[in-house]
Amino acid sequence: MRRRDELAGEVKHFQDMAETKRRDLDHINQALAIMGYPVPGAKPKAVRTSGLFFKGELPRMTLEQLRAAPEGITARQIAVQITEAKLWEPEPNFISALTAKVGRQLDKMRKRYHMVMEGSGRDCVWRL
């Protein structure tokens, strides 16, 4: 019985040590992420797209892209071209968030500008 108690105490001790080391590793990973280093297994920070455009700027830029591509264009292509026009960094997470914003804008504009949507989902092509 005594040996069992010793082993149980050792197991508890090592579990506490492992938890402490886990917390230390989390703190180091957070510090590295703040400094801009890539941290394996870390969740990417959510990208916010609110406040990027002046009032009416996104619909105007979207219409410009649609007019420039009479054969049709996807929301992702519009997002990439807007990113290039505004000289923003084309990071994958940012492009995805901006694509979603452009897609919502296209849905709002569909009836007003008699736009045609071919296909469905992410690969649908929009044209005037």
Image (cartoon, grey):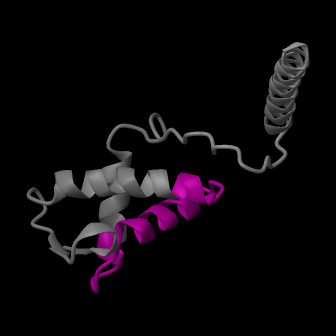
Q: State whether residue 5 is above or below residue 34.
A: above
Q: State whether residue 125 is above or below residue 75.
A: below
Q: Quadrant of the C terminus?
A: bottom left
Q: Is residue 86 visible?
A: no
Q: Give the x, y percent position of residue 121.
A: 27, 68
Q: Give the x, y percent position of residue 46.
A: 55, 40
Q: Nearer the viewer, residue 54 or 9?
A: 9
Direction from residue 90 to residue 34 in the image, left or right: right
Q: Quadrant of the N terminus?
A: top right
Q: Is residue 91 visible?
A: yes
Query: Range of the magenta residues?
Result: 66-95
Q: Give the x, y percent position of residue 73.
A: 34, 76
Q: Nearer the viewer, residue 40 or 72?
A: 40
Residue 90 in the magenta stretch? The answer is yes
Direction from residue 56 to residue 128 in the image, left or right: left
Q: Nearer the viewer, residue 112 or 8?
A: 8
Q: State whether residue 54 is above or below residue 72.
A: above
Q: Quadrant of residue 124?
A: bottom left
Find the residue positioned furthest to the bottom.
Answer: 71
Q: Give the x, y percent position of residue 31.
A: 85, 30
